Image (cartoon, helix red, strand yellow):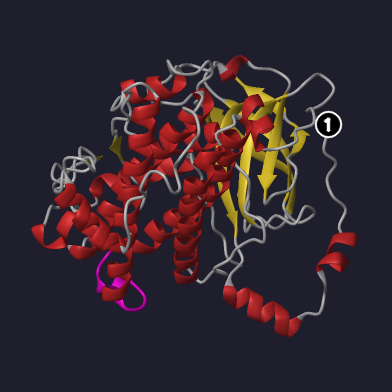
Amino acid sequence: MHTTSITAAALLGLSAFAAALPTTDTSSSQSSEASTVDAGSDAFEFPLANGFPNITAAKDKDIIALIQAQALGTLAQPGNTTANATKPTGASILGQGFVAFNELMEVAFFTELISNVTNNAPGYGPDDITGDRDQILAILKVHEAQEELHQLNAAGAFTKNSGGQVVEPCKYNFPVSNFAESIRLAATFTDVVIGTLPAIQTIFGKNGDAGLIRGVGASLGQEGEQDGFYRQYLGLAPAGLPFNTQSAVSLAFSAVVQSFIVADSCPQTLELFQNPSFTLEGLTLFDVLTPITDLGNGKEDIQDAEFAGTPVQVNAVAVNSLVAENLCITYLNQNNGPISFKAAVTGGSDKKTFTAPFPGRSLGFSGLVITTVTTGTVDGCGAFLNADDVAAATKFGPFLFEADNFIDDLINDSSSSSTTISETETSTAAPTATN
């Protein structure tokens, strides 16, 4: 049995490994090295050796040209994919800002990963990488440069439309200790991004900012191409799901902050998103949710799965989740409707434990599963239509879990079993959710 879980909060438990990863600057790896990070540092810090993110297309054309050459393409030009008939409205601007914020994290991640591979850091040497190491390194450099262009594109649009606001970088820790863990993290968080960008496209559409959709859609396709590479390296089906697991902007925001941001390293940036001046409603940073129960491969029913809820430790506006009552465990998987179970809640003022069913088998969990603790009522959990509804009711989360589909398992299943999905579903009694 393959057992794999990546959690936006539980990943913090691996942060000590990230602190030990060498990230020595070497001039031989072009723009992929951080100029302010050296061996022994406990966090990744911008800028890069090429000045990123403190560069613009207008004043740094030579630098942009080098990034474009490495990225195998050009920075999006206004008028084709990013034109909008009118100035975007508040929530659309917030979406642009979140993309810029998330891309900073991705550039930091890939820069550190490339540095570790280039310098044969422990866990990243030739014996730790399966396949053609030079080819893999070349692909990662392409991805890193493409993320730089994503960030520059979103950051420029955000600054223009928000009245001059700038998304400043944070300091980052990545909770991984070797190459395989790094690729696993890349695959899982790319799944989150793929589930969140459609939420931003939906915001654009609702706000009449349809001219912005094409640009986000273009980067969405690129993220999917990346994900297939990471998944195949891990022995997973490259296309993990027919419909990717839906997410929401606040869920992804919390996942980034809880998992990768060094506490107190960017209070102005977090304040910018939680209390923006350009829109009435900001993003919520939820408290932390981690599993207590071993969820195995995520494909079995567990009647009494336990999760722990604790206050987020990163500088943020308090959500006061520990005093909430009538709480539910809510699951998002694939593009299906959210499902909730009333949670038994125990604990005191510093930590809560939530107990509810985990219906992995009966609901056919596959790929990314997003778990949150949401508000309910005395009698039930309410009916959520989509991830946005879930985010609006969330107090703790997200816990990110991969119910994996390994290629070897698919081969073995097809040769040893003729059981169909419908036969499996009809033979399994699902736990009862409350609405």
Specify the quadrant that holds the N terminus: bottom right
Tell me residue 197's x, y (percent): 53, 44
The stretch of residues the image draws in magenta is: 124-133
Does 131 lie within the magenta span? yes
Which residue occupies the foreground of this view, 338 or 155? 155
Could you tell me how many numbered marks the image carries? 1
> Looking at the image, can residue 67 be seen?
yes
Check disc 1 and report its element: helix, strand or loop: loop
User: Relative to residue 272, is residue 301 drawn left or right?
Assistant: right
Tell me residue 392's x, y (percent): 64, 26
Tell me residue 321's x, y (percent): 58, 19
Identify the residue shown where x is 50% and y is 40%.
Answer: 212
Identify the residue shown where x is 37% and y is 49%.
Answer: 76
User: Relative to residue 274, is residue 400 drawn left or right?
Assistant: right
**Does 175 sit above or below residue 3?**
above
**Does 78 sit above or below residue 372?**
below
Identify the residue shown where x is 69% and y is 41%.
Answer: 331
**Does 202 sit above or below residue 66?**
above
User: Relative to residue 12, is residue 263 drawn left or right?
Assistant: left
User: Relative to residue 345, is residue 230 drawn left or right?
Assistant: left
Which residue occupies the foreground of this view, 190 or 305? 190
Does 367 lie within the magenta span? no
List the residue tagged with mark 1.
435
**Does 295 sit above or below residue 137?**
above
Identify the residue shown where x is 69% and y is 17%.
Answer: 325
Q: Tag 1: residue type?
A: Asn
> Looking at the image, can residue 122 be seen?
no
Specify the quadrant that holds the C terminus: top right
